[in-house]
Image (cartoon, rainbow, N blue to C red):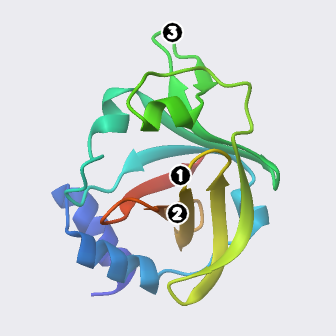
Amino acid sequence: MDARKEFLAILGEGETDTHTACRLFDEFGEVGLEELSGTWQGMEFRTGHPLDGMLKKLNWYGKAFHDAENVDPLLFEGPGGEIFPVDPAPLMDGRKLVKAAGGKARMRMMLHRGKISAAMIYDNLPIIDHFRKVEDGTLLGMMDEKTAAAPYFFILQKK
């Protein structure tokens, strides 16, 4: 089975393991910075990671890439449907959702797992999100957190 078909089958099943997610991530193609521009809607790619389910419960919407120096790494959807950026630092250390002025990350091309591809670097956290292209308009993201035992995976779809 090719990587894209396996990816779609996993979406249908609802969950996989970290090893399989890493293997698929490695098979997908590189992403250029210009391809990230715009707003992307996110969803989890469940692997049994401790963060699985957390963002969904909080109404995570996705990410917005404005330019190389200004990225909204976490967008959430309010009860009235409004989309707003959140500062990731208070959320990651267990406090609460704090609306952000925007631009709490930047993007760069980085070598990760043998390929040079687009990555998003958080301003105030030891986290880098790496991206690979599943197909046009769909990315598989791998959150590489310095203190985590395993990566967290997510999907972004262009809006």
Q: Please determine whether, in this image, residue 152 is positioned above or below residue 55.
A: below
- The residue identified by callout 1 is 157
CA distance for labels 3 and 1:
22 Å
CA distance for labels 1 and 2:
7 Å
- The residue identified by callout 3 is 80
Residue pictured at 23% horizontal, 61% vertical: 47
SS of the residue under disc 3: loop
Do the numbered discs 1 and 2 sit on residues whose CB atoms are within 8 Å? yes
Do the numbered discs 3 and 1 sit on residues whose CB atoms are within 8 Å? no
Residue pictured at 61% horizontal, 20% vertical: 99
Q: What amino acid is at disc 1? A: Gln
Label 1 crowding class (10 Å Cα cut-off): few <14, some 14-19, many 20+? some
Residue pictured at 59% horizontal, 67% vertical: 136
Q: Please determine whether, in this image, residue 84 is positioned above or below residue 28.
A: above
SS of the residue under disc 1: strand
Q: What amino acid is at disc 2? A: Leu
CA distance for labels 2 and 3:
27 Å
Label 3 crowding class (10 Å Cα cut-off): few <14, some 14-19, many 20+? few
